[in-house]
Image (tube, rainbow, N blue to C red):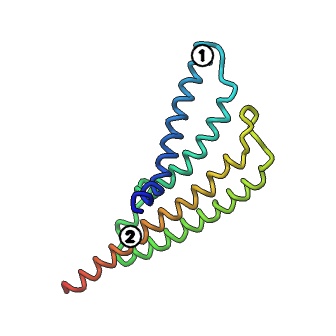
């Protein structure tokens, strides 16, 4: 059960990693074919768009899980532990609200392009845009798990501090 859960939790890493590798390989091959062989791939742009979108949103989930998202903590490091906790809660709520909004917008976008397909492979744009709501939900889950873990660690530290006093 634990291995299955870990595999599911790391699925975003696999999707983002494979997507990034495919983007690099396709781009290098595309440059070679266009500049050296004089025969560009007709399908290059649509596949790059597909993999860029999936890589970005699944990579965002990986960034939240590993704590690698961009953070500017110039003010936060100067705050008292209590004020920092309040700031962390506000930050969490704003981030989750923005991601929920993006999830809704991504779903609406996906539903609005059900009949639109890519020119070469005839891939539905709904499949491409599906990465947005899935990726945003994964980011909310990852950030919630990180926030909960941080909350528990802060609570334990406060209890230990209170026991020492």
The answer for how far apart the CA atoms under marks 2 and 1 are is 51 Å
SS for dot 2:
helix
Residue at the front extreme, as displayed: 1
Which image quadrant is residue 84 in? bottom left
Quadrant for the N terminus in the image: bottom left
Q: Earlier in the sequence, mark 2 or mark 1?
A: 1
| Residue 149 tag number | 2
Which image quadrant is residue 50 in? top right
Image position of 122 with respect to 153: above or below: above
Q: Nearer the viewer, residue 79 or 89?
A: 89
Q: Nearer the viewer, residue 78 or 11?
A: 11
* Residue at 77% from the left image edge and 50% from the top image edge: 113
Residue at the right extreme, as displayed: 115
Residue 152, percent across and down?
36, 75
From the viewer's perspective, is 65 left or right of 80? right
Residue 131, percent across and down?
62, 51
Image position of 109 with respect to 85: above or below: above
* Residue at 24% from the left image edge and 81% from the top image edge: 161
* Residue at 65% from the left image edge and 20% from the top image edge: 40
From the viewer's perspective, is 33 left or right of 89? right
From the viewer's perspective, is 34 left or right of 150? right
Tag 2 and tag 1, C-beta contact below 8 Å: no
Query: Badge 1 is on which residue?
Result: 35
Residue 54, percent across and down?
58, 46
């Amino acid at each position: 059960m634990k291995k299955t859960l870990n595999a599911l939790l790391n699925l975003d890493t696999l999707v983002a990693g494979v997507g990034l590798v495919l983007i690099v390989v396709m781009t290098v091959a595309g440059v070679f074919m266009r500049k050296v062989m004089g025969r560009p791939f007709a399908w290059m742009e649509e596949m790059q768009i597909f993999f860029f979108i999936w890589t970005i949103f699944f990579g965002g989930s990986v960034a939240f899980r590993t704590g690698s998202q961009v953070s500017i903590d110039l003010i936060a490091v100067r705050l008292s532990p209590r004020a920092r906790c309040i700031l962390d809660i506000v930050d969490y709520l704003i981030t989750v609200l923005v991601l929920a909004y993006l999830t809704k917008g991504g779903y609406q976008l996906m539903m609005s392009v059900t009949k639109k397909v890519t020119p070469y492979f005839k891939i539905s744009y709904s499949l491409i845009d599906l990465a947005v709501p899935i990726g945003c939900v994964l980011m909310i889950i990852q950030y919630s798990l990180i926030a909960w873990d941080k909350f528990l660690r802060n609570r334990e530290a406060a209890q230990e501090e209170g026991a020492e006093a």
